[in-house]
Amino acid sequence: MGGAPIDWKVMRSKIGPYPPEAYEFVRLGLAHTAQIVHGEKDPGDNRHVSGQQLCLGLKDFAIRQYGLLARTVLTRWNIQRTDDFGRIVFGMIDQGLMRKTDEDTMEDFRGVYDFGEVFAEPEHV
């Protein structure tokens, strides 16, 4: 995320209670998802992914990064459903940190999966 510094207070007031780490996670998760969807391509090529593809990629990225603690980490960042990923993405788009196509909407992020089902909680022994 280059360019002008991000005013986190403005971001939080416009988008929601997501800390800077949540935005960084989505940014890195987007690169991870583009790699899965498009493979090794020239960075100048179109590496667009849909909202649904991004949600699935972020699930995979969270599990790779945090393992069984993935849901706990996301919850700490106030990310509890795929809609939250959409709010973060569209907030970043509004700030010029990401781009979208005319076809991309918040609806693409609604109910892609249930966090309780895809992120296994560690069993208490």
Image (cartoon, rainbow, N blue to C red):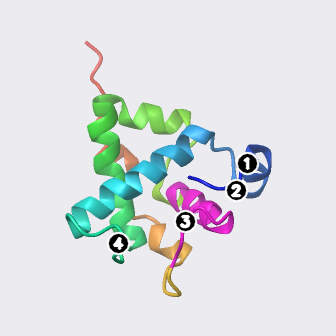
> Which amino acid type is shown beneath numbered disc 1?
Arg
Q: Residue at x 49, y 86 (%)?
A: 103
Q: Magenta residues, as a range?
A: 84-100
* Horizontal arrangement in the rendering, residue 106 relative to residue 96 (left or right): left
Q: Earlier in the sequence, mark 4 or mark 3?
A: 4
Asked whether the residues under the numbered discs 1 and 2 touch, taking CB atoms below 8 Å apart as contact, a structural biologist would say yes
Residue receiving disc 4: 47
Q: Quadrant of the C terminus?
A: top left
Question: Magenta part mainly helix, strand or loop?
Answer: helix
Q: Mark 4 near mark 2, Cβ–Cβ under 8 Å? A: no
Task: Tell me the amino acid under the disc marked 2.
Answer: Ile
Residue tagged 1:
12
Q: Kindly identify the amino acid type of the residue bearing the numbered disc 4.
A: Arg
Report the side of 91 relative to 85 (left or right).
right
Q: Dot 2: what SS?
A: helix
Identify the residue position indicated by label 3 in the image.
98
Q: CA distance from mark 4 to mark 3?
A: 12 Å
Horizontal side of residue 11 vs 42, given as left or right: right
Looking at this view, is 113 or 10 the one in front? 10
